[in-house]
Image (cartoon, rainbow, N blue to C red):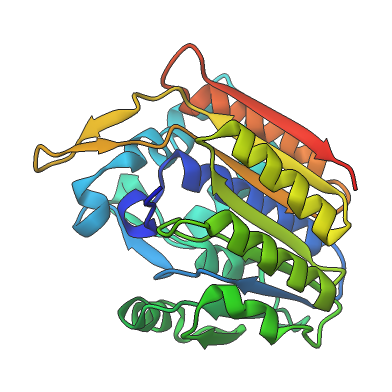
Amino acid sequence: MHYRHAFHAANFADVFKHVLLVGLLTELSKKAKAWVYVDTHAGAGAYPLAEGAAGSMPEWRHGVALVNSSAIAIGSEVPKMVDDYRTALRVCGFNPAAGHLVYPGSPELARNFARPAVGDRLVLCEKVEAVAETLRMTMRGSAIATQIHMRNGYEAWSLLPPQEKRGLILIDPPFEQPGEFDAIAKLAKRTGERFANAVQAIWYPLKDERACNQFVRRISRDTRRPALDLRIETDAPSRSVDANGIAKRRMTACGFLVVNPPFGFEDEARAAVPWLCRNMAQGQHAGWSIQRVEV
């Protein structure tokens, strides 16, 4: 699997991940105690959709363009988690109707929910120098305490434990190398050992269901914490042709594993995920699932 944020920004997988991320941040922010957000593979922080990498593969038209459409609000009740996500997009400046086609990445969305008066903090890791520099530009001028580390995200465990007692760790690698599931599992285990109270959110592509099931069970076993496994399948064509006429293999399904899910998150997700599936489906075999993974 070769999955880079810039090429697939705002597609169905990004929307699925970010809606759930917004749900997690919303639950964490219900308590007046500071949290830390750690993003192990932060990326550039924002992505222009009409140009560059995303412009050459406009997958966003089958993702955020569907979920953010004003037409959906007519005669259709939008789940709270999705509505919070759509609101966050507007706050971050994403407004296709006005020609503003810069999609906020996970760090930018997290900054939107961080509370400077409470002391919430962002810790962002990005190992590619040019991308890290873009991330710095995206996050500059922030009122939120933000640390950007140019380092391999799989080393993020060494930044723990934080001074805060509460936090969210987003593990969202590009899946460019073999053995990525093993690397994630090791990171999740080390994170749990150093920061037991952390909520860990892990995005993964869903290609080999058996391998994914084994991965999910391993994470739960190694962290010794309850987990919630959420999946979506769009039933999109598995192959597409880019602007240069080159055939590309497409991802049609993905998962989001949440270790230590906060109270209230599951109920909100059970309303949001089927709605997302209905509105981003590209075939009659689209589907979704939410499973508790017990220790």
Above or below 66: residue 229: below
Residue drawn 33% across the image and 47% down it = 96
Above or below 161: residue 284: above
Q: Position of residue 87 (x, y in %)?
A: 56, 51
Q: Nearer the viewer, residue 19 or 150?
A: 150
Residue drawn 46% across the image and 56% down it = 178
Q: Position of residue 70 (x, y in %)?
A: 45, 34
Above or below 138: residue 228: above
**On the picture, is 127 further left or further right than 231?**
left
Q: Nearer the viewer, residue 76 or 258?
A: 258
Kindly give the residue lying farthest to the left in the view shown: 244
**On the picture, is 22 further left or further right than 180?**
right
Q: Position of residue 44 (x, y in %)?
A: 39, 70
**On the picture, is 62 further left or further right than 124?**
left
The number of numbered discs placed on residues in the rendered structure image is: 0
Q: Nearer the viewer, residue 129 or 145?
A: 129
Q: Is residue 260 visible?
A: no
Q: Is residue 212 visible?
A: yes
Residue drawn 63% across the image and 33% down it = 210
Above or below 195: residue 248: above
Residue drawn 59% across the image and 64% down it = 183
Q: Position of residue 43 (x, y in %)?
A: 43, 69
